[in-house]
Amino acid sequence: MKYTLRESDLALLRKTGVSEPDIAHCVAVAGKALEMAQRTGLALDFELVGRGALFHDLGKARTHDIEHGRIGAELGAGLGLPLPILHIMEKHVRGGLTAPEAVELGLPVKDYTLRSLEERIVIYADRLVDIITDPGRIVASEAEAEERFEEILTTHARYGKNAVTLARYLGYHREIQGLMRRGGTG
C-alpha cells in the first residue's frame, strides 16, 4: 500500500466520541478501500482513500441516523480535515444522493453525487464491508462478497435500499471491478 492509517487519526475518532465498533468498521472500510485502490493499478490519491474511509462515519459520534454524513462533515471541518475528505463524509450516505433524493430523506438540498474515483471506491468498500461483516454471515469471505455483490444487493433490501440507490451501487461495483480486472489483480 502507498498509504497507512495513522494512529493520530484513530485517536481523533476516539476523542470525537466514535464508538469502538464504529471505529473497527471504519478501519475495515479503509483497509478494503486501500486494497481495491491498489488493485486498480491506477495512480490514485491513496491518502484520500484511506483517510476518507477512516473518517466516513465520524458523524456516528453524534447519531446513527441518515444525517450522520452531514454531521460528520461538520465535525470534520471543525477538526480541520481537508475538503476532499469532508466530501466523502458528507456524500457517502446511500452512495451519493441527488438533490431530489436529499429532499425526500430530509437532508439539506444539495447534490451529494460522487465525483471522484476515490470517493466511489470508499463508498463501494463501505457497502462491501457491511456485507462481509453482516451478523447473518451471508458470505464466507471478502472474495465471495465481491463475487455475489449484485445478487446480495438485489435480494437483501437493507443493502440495495431502493431502485435508485441499488442502481448506483451496482454501477460502482461494475466500474471498480472492471478497473481491478484491468489492473491485473481483480
Image (cartoon, helix red, strand yellow):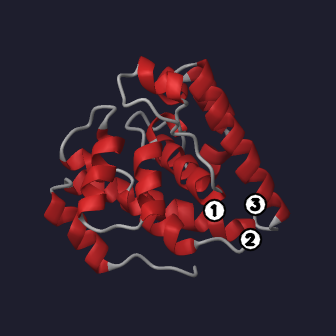
Q: Residue at x 26, y 37 (%)?
A: 64
User: On residue 36, which mark appears?
Assistant: 1
Residue in view at x 44 percent, y 38 percent: 93
**Amino acid type, callout 2:** Leu
Helix, strand or loop status at disc 2: loop
Amino acid type at circle 1 is Met
Q: Quadrant of residue 38?
A: bottom right
Q: Residue 32 location, x and y as percent?
A: 53, 60
Residue 100 horizontal side relative to residue 176, left or right = left
User: Which residue position holds label 3?
Assistant: 180
Give the position of the N terminus as an image quadrant.
bottom right
Q: Earlier in the sequence, mark 3 or mark 1?
A: 1
Q: Which mark is residue 145?
A: none
Dot 1 lies on which element?
Answer: helix
Q: Which residue is mark 2?
A: 42
Cβ–Cβ below 8 Å for labels 3 and 1? yes
Residue 34 percent coordinates (x, y): 55, 67
69 left or right, relative to 121: left
